[in-house]
Amino acid sequence: MTSTLKISRLTKRYDSVEALREVSLTLEPGMRMALLGHNGAGKSTMMKIILGLIPFDGGEVSVCGGAPGSAASRAQVAYLPENAAFHPALTGEEQIRHYLALRGESTAQAGELLERVGLGHAARRRIGTYSKGMRQRVGLAQTLIGRPRLLVLDEPTSGLDPVSRRDFYALLDGLAAEGASILLSSHALTEVEARTDRILILSRGRLVASGTLPSLRQEAALPVTLLVTPAEGRAKALAAALPGATATADGRLRLDCPQADKLAVLARIVTALGPQMADLDVIPPSLEDIYTNFSHRDGS
Ligand SMILES: Nc1ncnc2c1ncn2[C@@H]1O[C@H](COP(=O)(O)OP(=O)(O)OP(=O)(O)O)[C@@H](O)[C@H]1O
């Protein structure tokens, strides 16, 4: 299987700023990858290099088998900038027809593309009357032109409401299922946690973590939280039996334990204290916890 994107030991400097330092990653067909990092971590720089918009200083980059910015790779890559700007006087359909013409594609597909992103009903309205979410969908429709193999999306859901975000990710899921690779940057960790397959964390230009969520959880070795709800009238007895636990505002008991001890601790609690409990929740570390952990390891 040919990787859609292969980057090895990529380094980029802007004068005195080292924006990327020896960053490596591989993106396979059908994979949805999230690029996370603080402001100035190097995410946009990496995207611009992939698109062939700026040169780099060291390492190798192969985009759909070609050099970034080459005609072959450009034909297979789509890009959605964070704040895509469109002509307010054009209708959604006119704008997409324009992009189709630029790409040498049949303009007759405009309606279908807008339908796909949920804008069929507004296709003939001027973009100047669209909401931010609707404009973002025009941008997404534009990225679908020519069935790209790689979609590079810079904070694609910023400013979208929860339902629009869910619809947006559902669309990405469909594209990935058809074999497209997706690289997106985001600061919205909760949605990334649920809707991507691989996570990269950049900090000050260096890749501080990369992998699936379970593998990053393991690597971070953060504790698992057990939340125990006492049975009626058993709160005091339960608190006494769990001396390491702290009381939460909603009357539950919180116990943190190392991931490796989770099953043993659970077995012990359930066997010894089962009748005193009304419920027990096991909460793994969130992507936010993991992100914070790796970012702090880097000293930032
Ligand atoms: N044209 C430029 N000239 C000089 N320095 C630059 C230039 N573009 C980016 N930088 C610097 O390179 C570093 C990485 O910037 P980049 O825009 O890639 O970060 P980012 O992760 O996309 O940040 P954000 O989340 O804020 O969009 C920053 O220190 C930034 O100031």
Image (tube, helix red, strand yellow):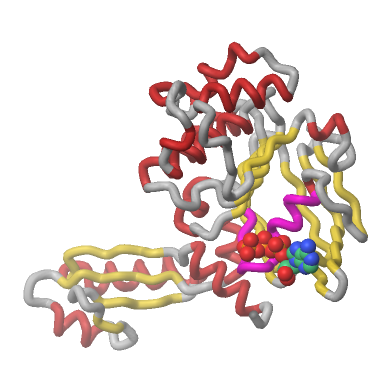
Q: Report the side of 67 relative to 100 (left or right).
A: right
Residue situated furthest right in the rendering: 58
Residue situated furthest front in the rendering: 89
Asked which quadrant contains residue 264, the reply is bottom left
The residue positioned 56% from the left and 30% from the top of the image is 141
Write down which quadrant ligand 1 falls in.
bottom right
Q: Is residue 201 visible?
A: no
Position in image of residue 126 (x %, y %)? 46, 29
Q: Which one is nearer the viewer's eye here, 234 or 117?
A: 117
Q: Which one is nearer the viewer's eye here, 18 or 221?
A: 18
Locate the C terminus and report the quarter of the image it occupies: bottom right
Q: Is residue 238 above or below residue 122?
A: below
Q: Report the side of 51 relative to 117 (left or right).
A: right
Asked which quadrant contains residue 124, the reply is top left
The residue positioned 86% from the left and 59% from the top of the image is 9
Locate the N terminus and report the quarter of the image it occupies: top right
Q: Is residue 63 visible?
A: yes
Q: How many marks?
A: 0
Position in image of residue 293 (x %, y %)? 57, 74
The residue positioned 25% from the left and 82% from the top of the image is 247
Position in image of residue 12 (x %, y %)? 85, 62
Residue situated furthest left in the rendering: 233
The residue positioned 67% from the left and 43% from the top of the image is 152
Reply yes or no: does residue 223 show up in magenta: no
Q: Which residues are magenta?
A: 35-49
Position in image of residue 279 (x %, y %)? 22, 63
Q: Report the side of 21 relative to 39 (left or right).
A: right
Q: Report the side of 26 relative to 209 (left or right).
A: right
Q: Is residue 283 above or below residue 159?
A: below
